[in-house]
Amino acid sequence: MSIYSPEQKVKIARDPGRPGTADFIEGLFTDFFEQRGDRLCAEDGSILGGIARFHGRPVTVLGHRKGKNLEENLHCNFGMPSPEGYRKAQRLMKQAEKFGRPIITFVDTPGAYPGKEAEARGQGEAIAQCLALMSALTVPVISIITGEGGSGGALALAVGNRVLMLEHAVYSVLSPEGFASILWKDASRSGEACAVMKLTAQDLRRGGIVQGVLREPEGGAQNDWQATFRTMDAALQKELAALDKLSGPALAKQRYQMFRAMGQDLAPAGKEDL
Amino acid sequence: MNRFFAQRRDRLLMYQAMREGRITSARRSACPRCGEESTALEWVQHKQVCPKCGHHCPVGAYYRLSMILDPGSFQELEEKREPADPLDFPGYPAKLEQLQADTGLKDAVVTALGRVQEKKAVFAVMDSRFLMGSMGTAVGEKVTLAVEYAMRHKLPLVIFAASGGARMQEGIFSLMQMAKTAAAIQRFQDRGGLYISCLTHPTTGGVTASFASLGDIMLAEPGALIGFAGPRVIEQTIGEKLPDGFQRAEYLLDHGFLDQIVPRDQWRRVLGQLLALHDKGGRA
């Protein structure tokens, strides 16, 4: 049992002092080369990605970026990607597959941006294509939910062979505010929503949605970045080593089967046999 | 349960009788869009499309299948699959039971084997009367099983989407159905399978952002609302009113996300044509 309530964890997960994707890239990788643009229409600052080395080995790394101050927040749209961001992510992941690089994704977003232009350019299609693409990749994919994993906008970067979560991160079908607003027509009941949503790392580990929970320093990752990086580094090394033993098709198959099984035994086939 | 199948059969028989002119009804009801009244017979003859303004009213899954499939070719798949309550969500089992009683559906999607103009295919048809057609574990599982059935039997796949998105009451498990269904479609298509995605009013949220947007052929009914975020959420976010026609099928066609818009009385013709053009239904 955690000492923090789900509602407190949502607060910790959103703490602006927590390390973000840019910090994880700086803290865990060397030789980072940023890749920008979707080659179709625009560059989206809310997803940061590129090539880097992890213990000397080239990998593709990408994740949601929220920014650290108002100017950065605006540039990154507070970590809410538009279709261009998801299409950039697809481009980077296809390239990673082409060059045989493992992919590491960091997930931290309130959700995909619900805007007019985002809809005009196919937000739903962009996310759907990310899911389809990731499900079939023949390179290792490790996804880490580092802060708030909100909705399809988070899942779009989280179809990994392993999905890990920082201890106080949260991951849910929608933000607690959105959830309360849809179900009870009252966004102010978000605290209540947190309690029923089973959105904590511990709940999700039990439900088989994530495969590992990474310990955070006392009070949360914001209190000691270096300790968080060390934990994450060890976990990434361990998981990569395990996935390296699988062939390309075996990686795609393992990932497919893992997501295929989610909710499979929950929806019973019915009392009588067909 | 048998009562509901009996009711459904009676209703379908009544529609058929009315179409064939054997019975008539003078009961009138108003179109939700133009407000003009039409008789029950006129509504049935026009397949629940307003005879005055052409507004396409939502229709249930079994009724839609009865309009599209060759008579006698309907064979339901996974009809006994029940929804689950993975979050122990307060009040959810009672709500499911009530909806099952009211609609005769187990959950928000019906999957079936059938033929259109002699061409065999696997169908999944969503029903917005069941919790807004939202996708929880049962819907995700049934859609995935339908994709796998099509893959196993090398048949084309036709899905009619109608959904408010992921089902809140099943939380993260609903979200995972997006990854599961999208992955199944990708597999099916990688093996040469034909997937025709038909979007009907409304198709939003997690269904738009997963299997519904991945068709080899993308079609929609006139006027259908199709999008990721709902219009109310967008208006709240950007602080302005959205223009008329925003996120409607015609808007999506203009923006390059659809092949064609198909009026309700044309589905049989268009699906028949497409299935014939891909004869043998792809290599899946």
Image (tube, coloured by chain):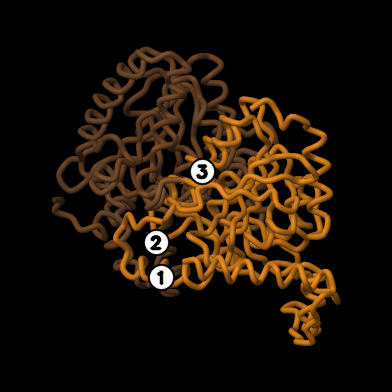
Chain colours: A brown, B orange
Give me the C-alpha separation between circle 1 and circle 3.
Answer: 39 Å
> Disc 3 designates what residue?
A46
What x and y, as percent, mark residue A214? 23, 36
- Nearer the camera: disc 1 or disc 2: 1
Q: Amino acid at mark 3?
A: Ser
- Nearer the camera: disc 2 or disc 3: 2
Residue B259 lies left or right of residue A262; in this view the side is right
Q: Nearer the viewer, residue B43 or A15?
A: B43
x 52%, y 20%: residue: A96
Does residue B225 lie above or below A28 as drawn?
A: below
Does residue A206 lie above or below B101 as drawn?
A: above
Q: Amino acid at mark 1?
A: Lys
Residue A107 lies left or right of residue A134; in this view the side is left
> Disc 1 designates what residue?
B95
Q: Amino acid at mark 2?
A: Gln
* Residue at mark 2 shares a chain with residue at mark 3: no
- In the drawing, what numbered circle is on residue B169? 2
User: Mark 1–mark 2 contact, CB under 8 Å?
Assistant: yes
What x and y, as percent, mark residue A173? 42, 53
Element carrying mark 1 = helix
Q: Nearer the viewer, residue A229 or B130?
A: B130
Taking the image as drawn, is residue A76 in sight? yes
